[in-house]
Amino acid sequence: MKILSLDCAGKILTVTLTAGGELFFKDSGSAGSKKHNSLILPFADELLTRAGITVRDLDAIACVVGPGSFTGIRIGVSTAHALARATGAKLISINTLQARAFGEQDDFAVALQCRPNESYLAAFCGDCFNMTACRAAEEDEISALNMRVIRHEGSLSPQNLASFASALASKGQFTPSLSPLYLKKSQAERLADGE
């Protein structure tokens, strides 16, 4: 299956393509101050060219829907929707914390810091496919958990992103539409609400 995967939810934009048993990827780690929205389509085009296929050859488009950067999530989701509509490719929704948990075992949690004393938190029982909670949590709550906590730094590795997208595809976990996963109000919403 040919899958293009997009992660705009972190500081680093990551685009991967699995095709013909190979993994192609590009990230913005060395792109300087360029924004995700100016890089995402050129990155995808470069990977398709390297793989020797066109966008119409894609079977699925996977996209990280959050939690993470509000603006980055919107860029990724809108790009994935546009590509899927133009090509007929299926959509795969990826939760940042669940993807980071891919390959881990037993009872554990993944935390991604979103504010100085607060993190996005997901708890798992057994493996990443059995998520028991996904919410924002204060650091003292996380410290009190009676399980191993994996600290996610905010950007998925290309291998992690592509492997998790392929795992979801093999389970038939496609969705007709992507919905951003916001676990907190945006700064604009907080200001409008007087918080």
Image: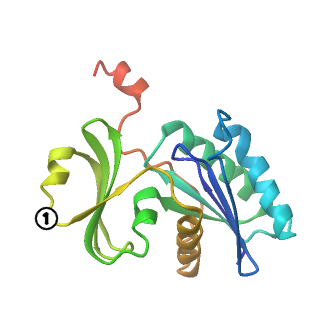
Which corner quadrant holds the N terminus?
Answer: bottom right
- Residue 69 on image: x %, y %: 48, 40
Label 1 Cα crowd, 10 Å radius (few <14 / some 14-19 / many 20+) = few
Instruction: Give the camera-side residue of 143 and 95.
Output: 143
The image quadrant where one finds the C terminus is top left
Left or right: residue 52 versus residue 117 is right
Question: Taking 149 as reference, is 184 left or right?
Answer: right
Locate residue 152, reporting x and y percent: 39, 55
- The kind of secondary structure element at disc 1 is loop
Asked if residue 94 is positioned above or below residue 113 in the image, the reply reads: below
**Rendering quarter of residue 49:** bottom right
Relative placement, left or right, of 113 versus 139 is right
Residue at coordinates 83% horizontally, 65% vertically from top-left?
50
Answer whether residue 86 is visible to the viewer in this image.
no
The quadrant holding residue 16 is bottom right
Q: How is the image coloured?
A: rainbow
- Label 1, on which residue? 146
Q: Is residue 129 visible?
A: yes
Residue sticking out furthest to the front? 30
Residue 113 position, x and y percent, is 34, 44
Identify the residue shown where x is 68% and y is 48%: 79
Residue in the image at 56% along x and 73% along y: 163
